[in-house]
Amino acid sequence: METLGIDIGGTKIAGGICDEKGNIRCLQRVPTPENAADINAAVADIYRRCKGEGDIKAIGISAAGNIASDRRTVSFAANLPAWNQYPLADAIEDLIGDGVKVVVENDANAAGWGEYRFGAGRDSRDMIMITVGTGVGGAIIVGGHLVRGAFGMAGEIGHIIMVPDGEACGCGLFGCAEQYASGSALERFAWSAARRQPNQSTHLLEACDYDRSKLIGPMVRDAAREGDPTAIEAFSRLGDWLGRLMADLSAVLDPDTFVIGGGVAEVGDMLLGPAATAFNRHLQASMYRQHASIVEARAGGNAGIIGAADLARDDRE
Ligand SMILES: [Zn+2]
């Protein structure tokens, strides 16, 4: 059974026809329009372009926001207020008018499902994906099922409070994991270390022109690869928080695999090494239990498309 997977991202909308093995055909990419109506039109347009190429039975949409348990309504979208309490599936079905069913999934859940079915979690049964990008996203799979929660809000790993009254988070709370284990945190760690030890941070300071507002994650990565001790230390601090987060998650869910994805995780061992060390240190009964594998994501940038497409199949409800 073929379905169409569409990933509505902050900068681009990408979609294509997916088969049951996770292969994509007719891949389309367009810049993300600014308002809700134009986004719907762009999605409908991708459908029309792919329609002739396959027998599309359903459409799975990956969207950045909290999705209600009906898998049709966006409850809350921090980056697109027009989507708060927005019936996204209805709007797109009306526009397409073909009787094709639309299912909406949270973007981190769709990407996590893509990894579970076709990527690094393929041999797993109980898997947690942590996406380390600008923020921290999560997806939880237990016993082969995506955990959406009673109200659709499960898997928001980035908003577990790790530091009481800690750093202010974009969600309105304080001390969320997202403020310590994300790409934004990496920049903060690197900058504070560079200010304290400028001689150990030459590559980084030159790359950002000694200007905090110009400092971005890839500069920290490059500086670490070129040997700036403070940049390596920033990854190590980030890994430490990530390891603590995984230990906490293991206390609740005891998964067999953690898949770490997102742009920041592309450095591999520089992050995953310290993360594994911290995980082992903070894991309860560490010496007397089996440890989850910690692996890099493998399905790449199209994980959201293939995940959403797969979740739109009838048997995935
Ligand atoms: Zn938060």
Image (spheres, rainbow, N blue to C red):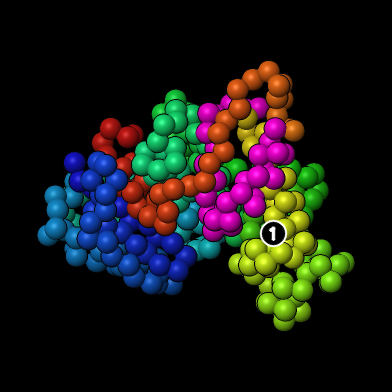
- Residue at 81%, 48% in the rendered image: 165
**Bounds of the magenta segment:** 251-280
| Left or right relative to 187: residue 196 | right
Picture quadrant of residue 231: bottom right
Task: Please tell me whether residue 310 is drawn above or below residue 238 in the rendered image.
Answer: above
- Residue at 57%, 30% in the rendered image: 292
Q: Position of residue 105 (x, y in %)?
A: 40, 47
Quadrant of the snapshot with the C terminus? top left
Residue 259 forms part of the magenta stretch: yes
Q: Amino acid at mark 1?
A: Leu
Residue lying at the far front of the rendered structure: 227
Residue with the mark numbered 1: 186
- Residue at 43%, 72% in the rendered image: 34
Residue 157 forms part of the magenta stretch: no
Q: Main secondary structure of the magenta part?
A: helix
Q: Nearer the viewer, residue 263 or 203?
A: 203
